[in-house]
Amino acid sequence: HGLGLDLRAAQAQAAVEPELSAFCFDPALEVVRALLENPRTGLVQARLIAAHHRTAAGLELLGARGAFANDAGVRRALLQNPLLPAGLYRRLWAPRRLLEQFLVATSREAPEQVRAMARDLMRTSFNQRVGEERAEFILATEGRCLASLVGLTLDSHATAILCRRTYTSTLLVQNLARWSAAPPALIAHLRRQDLVKRNPVLRQMLERHPNAT
């Protein structure tokens, strides 16, 4: 701590353990840049930087290194860092499946800023994915994801897939019934399910849906 910035950066660029890992806690961007230029820096140090560094630019430098950005431990640490840049999050998680994005959006370990980024990306991704993945996403989460998808719609392919299923989950039917964008064909299909016929609460929810015919 007593050393000047230039000297810390110079030492970080050539450091060996245990000083190498100690420099990962340095708050300066210049020191992180020097660490990433050190050939001895590996996944242990990358995970420490991801967890403890507090500048967006430094985290961007880390994320630009593919070998580090693709490591599960680095990604997990980044998700817990409140300074994770939105651009880096989108770059790392946009290619991932909707279910993986949902798990970040609902994670208790991630700060609210990160969960908000995850929800925004999930909404954008939902509009871009094929019908199979949309339907699979809704079924895998038992409709819990729909609370974050208000204002979005289902394409005809996803609707057709959902209309071919037999429903036995009360929670899934409840969540679909609360989703104002549920298509008329899906609402009609749900009303024909034995589960709904036996449950007056579900039946009433579906009857009151804006797309009920």
Image: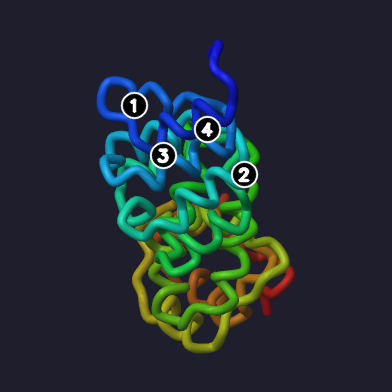
Distance, label 3 to label 1, CA atoms, is 9 Å
Which residue does the numbered mark 4 point to in the structure image?
53
Between discs 1 and 2, the one toward the N terminus:
1
- Judging by the rendered image, the residue that carries numbered circle 1 is 21
Identify whether 142 is placed above or below 76.
below
Q: Nearer the viewer, residue 149 or 209?
A: 149
Q: Amino acid at mark 3?
A: Leu
**Tag 1's secondary structure?**
helix
Q: Dot 2 lies on which element?
A: helix
First reached walking from the N terminus: tag 3 or tag 1 = 1
Cα distance, mark 1 to mark 2?
Answer: 20 Å
**For discs 4 and 3, the disc positioned in front in the rendered view:** 3
- Residue 153 lies left or right of residue 107; in this view the side is right
The Cα atoms of the two marked residues, 4 and 3, are separated by 12 Å
Q: Which residue is mark 3?
A: 35
Residue positioned 46% across, 60% down in the render: 92
In the image shown, does 183 or 134 lie closer to the viewer?
A: 134
Q: Is residue 65 visible?
A: yes
At label 3, counting other C-alpha atoms closer than 10 Å, the crowd grade (few under 14, some 14-19, many 20 or more) is many
Q: Is residue 127 left or right of residue 109?
A: right
- In front of the other: label 1 or label 4? 1
Image quadrant for the C terminus?
A: bottom right
Identity, as a three-letter code, of the amino acid under mark 4: His
> Foreground mark, 1 or 2?
1
Distance in Å between CA atoms under marks 1 and 4: 12 Å
